[in-house]
Amino acid sequence: MTILYKVQGVCGCKEGNVLLQNSVLCRISKKNLVVFCVHQNLHSQLYICDIVKPWQNYKICSSKAVASVLEWNPTGELLLVGYKHGLAEIWGMKANCMNSWFLLYTVNLPCEEIINVKFFHNSKATYFNMQKKDLQNYSDKYERLDQRPTLAYFGCSPVEGCFLLTASGLMGVFTIPRISMNPESSNSASPSELNIFTNSIGLSRCFITHCSISYCPTGRFNVAINNWSEPRISCFKIGVEREQDDTLNLKCGAMASIFLQRADNENKEISVVHWRTVNCEEVAFVVYDCIEGSFIEQWNLIKKHQQVHKLLQKNKSDFMQWEQWEITAKLSLTSRVCDLSLSKLPTESLLLFAILRDNSVQILETGLKKIGSTVFERVAEDQMRAPCKLLTSDCTHLNQLLILFDNLGQMYAMQVPTSHYDKNYKMSPLAVPVCLLEYSVITGIDAADVLMLNLSHLEALTEKLTENFSRQTAYVRHFYYSNFLSLKSNICRIQTKQQDFDDLITLHAIAIAFKSLLRPSDLSSQDKGPAENLSMILSEPVGDVDKVLCVLDAKDFTVEPATLQSLQQLIQWVSDLALNILHKLTEDVLKPKFNKRHGYEICRDVIAVSSVRELLVMIRIWGLLNPHCLPIYTKSVDNFDVLPVMFRLLTRLMQNTSEPDDSLLDECSVLSTQVLVPTRHINTPTTLLNSNATSKLFPFVFQTSVESLNLQDVHYEEVLFSHTIKDDVSNLHLGTHQHVLHKEERQQATVLEKEEILNCVAPTSWENSPTMATTSPACNNLSPISTPSLGNSHTSNLPYYVLNGEVSHLGIMSSKRPNFKSRLRAVHHDAAHPTAIAGGAGNSTNNSPGILSSTHC
């Protein structure tokens, strides 16, 4: 068990200030975002950071009230903060920006102390079983658990809501509207207040000091409560039902309680209670504090049968079934337990992380068997600084990292052992990481913690992951294609071939967005749509693009000229990509003859080359409708038509991508003398997912807001233009002087700019699409971030994207849109085109997108 890094001053604590017990709270979302709250100087400060950029944290809010609980929703998009005076707040990110949060909803229970909360379950849970690692199909290897939603609409659609419990024994439940508030129109000073429905737990309310809330497979909540003065842990099953008048009703069912023996109750105080369902078995963990140290007990709910008396039984086999808690394991520790956290990955074994006051971490599995331990170094005690003591912890959703906080406001990351998943771990050490990466592709959970611990084996992981993905059926590959590309792009970003996979993701998004604009002229006479017909026609090696136009029906490719003009920068990107593929073809072919080929090469991908050919045909047709939407070239000969030449060369390349003929390589070499090939931008953000981190020794020591120089990548060939700004989402050069607001978008430096534009929905839908949340080269997000729908449904809607196992809407083509938009501008401090700088693209922010992009080449 290795300590990966330590971040000093992460909570803003000054020298000499010490945090008390229960003054730090932390929770990790499925996107590996760490939110933590510090109560200091009569204020609660709420921060957030990423596990791959722990030195960069952002403040969400500050409150004079004391925060008592933090909780993420199942998708990791909403954050609930509960306070001791009875207020609960639900926060959300603005346009997926980590440093921009707004208050969505509030729930108020006056004079009640909220001690625990839990969001409704959405019935989506996948079991991770290493015993099925040799199976080929994802559906057989990763089975979906039989989990019902807590509350469902008509058609079994899960309801978004939350269940909370107060210290006085009051239960509360409320639902969250399906359509979230618009962050642009919402006012943080007056958020919407939700109605809450309450009921008492049990027959009468009682004072609660410790409680545990977990999910039940039937959709109900398992709740265990305890009062420190009573030697009993009461257990309940709470169900949520909807009445006819849209009110919610809480049904509380009492279960068998855990009673402590009188002899064991002396000089013991319960400090932690956890109740979980493990492999369809109810398991409870109880921690006691005593003078000698601590005790951890494991209790199992056992079903017993009692024979009915002869006078009352009808048959001899009649019996009564009843349940009873029985202690199955007990462990004594020499130091008191500060915190006990449980693993989150659904497996056959459950991991327990016991944080002790002697700065040690004990890792246990079901049955309280020790599988590892780590002792953190103490800070030297002097007059100005107190000793370092661990306070709280939380585990990532893939059980790879354990995040801890101490009383000095320092954050730690510790590796969790994975040997318990597979008995033959030493024989095949990459089996567990490969299965975890496949699990992240299926579930959409961020896999940054897995990659961080396997930086030296990325090439083998990539080959195995790609091989297993190619064996899946066509519809399975199509369903998880976006998640797979996002994960593989991050793996290639750590290696040398970063740019090609970033281009592939952007090409995939642009192809879907462009094809969504096509509308067939006659639905009754066509079996296939315009995009399918184009793909079928281009399957044949036709090198003349004008001959292809003669076969197609021009009515199927008709798009409004204003829409085409707004998409000019994306058309320019496709043309630049085609030029770069042909320009670097000679280098990419000759390089493997001398060195071993590493990573992904887009010029050898037949599907990518075919997609570029299809887009070039569409651009050729659209150029006849609106010549201003055509890409701009800098040519040495005026009468040289670039687009037909690129189409002809790509057609020849598609016929044999593995070994192109020499004549094709000669023509590609001459192409750079006829037209200026734009330089591709490389922007590698400074994160722990970096090849430089493999040669360093753990642990890293970071300082808050100070970027480590050892992890930075410098591209010396592009230092000359390192001060220019490039918009990767819209493919625009913004110049060198831009007075805009910088924002952090999930491990990516971005800029938020509001500008007056034409009422055209296509670029707005493109920039707000869920696919573009992962297409920018500077983004290290491993799971696509879904974006809420932008309006109601119309017949002119853009298509649906399959992301995270769900269907997320790309956008709405409606003319009733506001006259401004929010743009996420990716800030590139790398290269930019010298012609764009000279053209002054940064000083033309009021021009149309098409005019701005004309300075690209």
Image (cartoon, grey):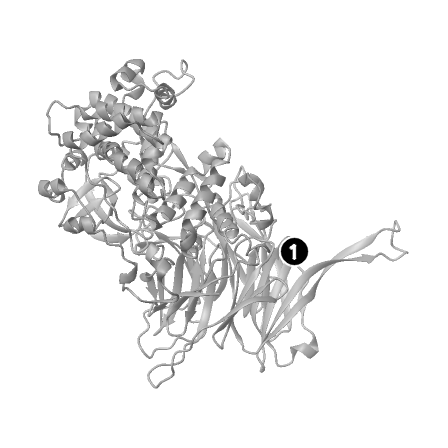
Residue 766 to residue 292: above or below: above
Query: Would residue 561 be found to the left or right of residue 599 on screen?
Result: left
Residue 8 or residue 656, whichever sits in front: 656
Residue 546 or residue 794, whichever sits in front: 546
Q: Position of residue 297 (x, y in %)?
A: 63, 69
How many callouts does the rendering have? 1
- The residue at which mark 1 appears reads as 281
Residue 405 to residue 119: above or below: below
Q: How crowded is mark 1: few (under 14 residues within 10 Å), some or many (20 or more)?
A: few
Residue 856 appears in view: yes
Q: Where is residue 560 in the image (x, y as percent from the top left)?
A: 24, 24
Residue occupying the point 15% across, 29% down: 674
**Looking at the rendering, in which quadrant would you find the C terminus?**
top left
The single residue placed furthest to the bottom in the displayed view is: 383
Residue 236 to residue 460: above or below: below
Query: Would residue 552 be found to the left or right of residue 140 on screen?
Result: left
Residue occupying the point 21% across, 49% down: 830
Residue 617 or residue 456, whichever sits in front: 456
- Amino acid, disc 1: Glu
Query: Would residue 243 be found to the left or right of residue 316 on screen?
Result: left
Residue 177 appears in view: no
Residue 290: quadrant of the picture: bottom right
The single residue placed furthest to the right in the displayed view is: 311
Q: Where is residue 313 in the image (x, y as percent from the top left)?
A: 87, 53
Residue 618 to residue 781: above or below: above
Q: Position of residue 377 (x, y in %)?
A: 43, 75
